[in-house]
Amino acid sequence: MPELPEVETIRRDIDKEFVNKRIRKVDVTGGRSVRRHQTIADFVSRIEGRKLVSTRRRGKYLLLRLDSGDVLVVHLGMSGQMLRASPKEPIGKHAHVVLTFVGAPQLRFVDPRTFGELFVTAPEKLEEEVPELAHLGFDPLDDQLTWTRFAEMLMARRTKLKPLLMDQKFVAGIGNLYADEILFGAGLRHDRNSDNLTPQEIRRLYRSMVETLQEAIKHRGSSLADEQYRDLFGDVGEYQGLHNVYAREGEPCRRCRSTIVRTRANQRSSYFCPHCQI
Ligand SMILES: [Zn+2]
């Protein structure tokens, strides 16, 4: 499932490739991908002829601002991809929405598992449409917190670190994969309590969160064995080769050579080094 680094990688490329370009035509073949709209025609009419003026990311949501003032919201779900393609390239069966730009290639929303979605809304209605956005926590890339503030927030929550990092109301954009990598970088176990960290551990956690996500963006995100995450150009990410713990059960820790361990809790796997993480 795409997390902050993957969504941010796609956003930056869409920004470079499609901002200031006008959408000439919209084709929707999968109604499920625009399910918030009463009709496909309603979705199409709010986008066709509009120019894309800016891009933004909030958590795992991509917000594409149109010159009408509306926002085209994209959520990739489990397997969604935003692909740049030439109109000449054959359209695959999972390409549910195709935006054709004037004098530019197409932007195709491809989603085999159809958990992802696109919809158009007025900016002031956004948080009503997506209540998750109204309660979104701080953004590790956009918002800088002081150590003191971060420490206060951890103390106030009294919960285990991994579910806390994945709680979108606490911090936006982190899922299972990056939570494990961040905790390794901080030298902390997934089941440590948030209100029981030393000042040094709090700083390590904050620093690892920012640095891990920035590194992952620098390496264009992570594609797992299923290769479902693709960037705008259809390429896999490069960060998976640099994972320290995620999906590395039984392999040696890159730092201490101990064996990476996997545990399961609440139907979710956690990977960690029993020596480096305490
Ligand atoms: Zn280790």
Image (spheres, helix red, strand yellow):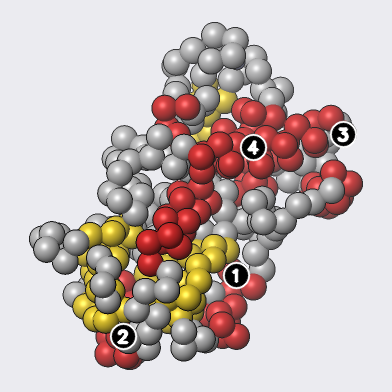
Question: Disc 4 residue type?
Answer: Glu
The numbered mark, 2 or 4, whose residue comes first in the sequence reads: 2
Q: Amino acid at mark 3?
A: Pro
Spatial CA distance of label 1 from label 2 is 26 Å
Q: Nearer the viewer, residue 164 or 79?
A: 79
* Mark 1 surroundings within 10 Å by alpha-carbon count, few (fewer than 14), some (14 through 19), many (20 or more): some
Q: Are marks 1 and 3 in contact (CB under 8 Å)?
A: no
In space, the residues marked 4 and 1 are separated at their CA atoms by 24 Å
Q: Which mark is residue 199?
A: 3
Residue 139 x, y percent position in the rendering: 66, 56
Would residue 98 appear left or right of 219 to someone viewing this image?
left
Provide residue 89's location: percent of width, then percent of height.
13, 59
Crowd rating for badge 2 (residues with CA inside 10 Å; few <14, some 14–19, many 20+): some
Q: Sequence-wise, which precedes: disc 1 or disc 2?
A: 2
Q: Identify the residue shown where x is 47% and y is 56%.
A: 12
Among the two numbered marks 1 and 3 on one chain, the one whose residue lies closer to the N terminus: 1
Q: Quadrant of ligand 1?
A: top right
What's under tag 1, amino acid-wise?
Answer: Leu
Q: Which residue is label 2 attached to?
A: 48
| Proximity of marks 1 and 2: CB atoms separated by less than 8 Å | no
| Residue 102 in view, yes or no | yes
Q: Disc 3 or 4, which lies upstream in sequence?
A: 3
For marks 4 and 1, the one nearer the N-term is 1
Residue at mark 3 to residue at mark 4: CA–CA distance: 18 Å
Per the image, the residue denoted by label 1 is 133
Q: Amino acid at mark 2?
A: Glu
Q: Secondary structure at mark 3?
A: helix
Mark positioned earlier in the residue sequence (2 or 3): 2
Q: Residues within 10 Å of mark 3 (few under 14, many from 20)?
A: few
Q: Secondary structure at mark 4?
A: helix
Describe residue 225's horizontal placement relative to residue 67 as left or right.
left
Q: Quadrant of the C terminus?
A: top right
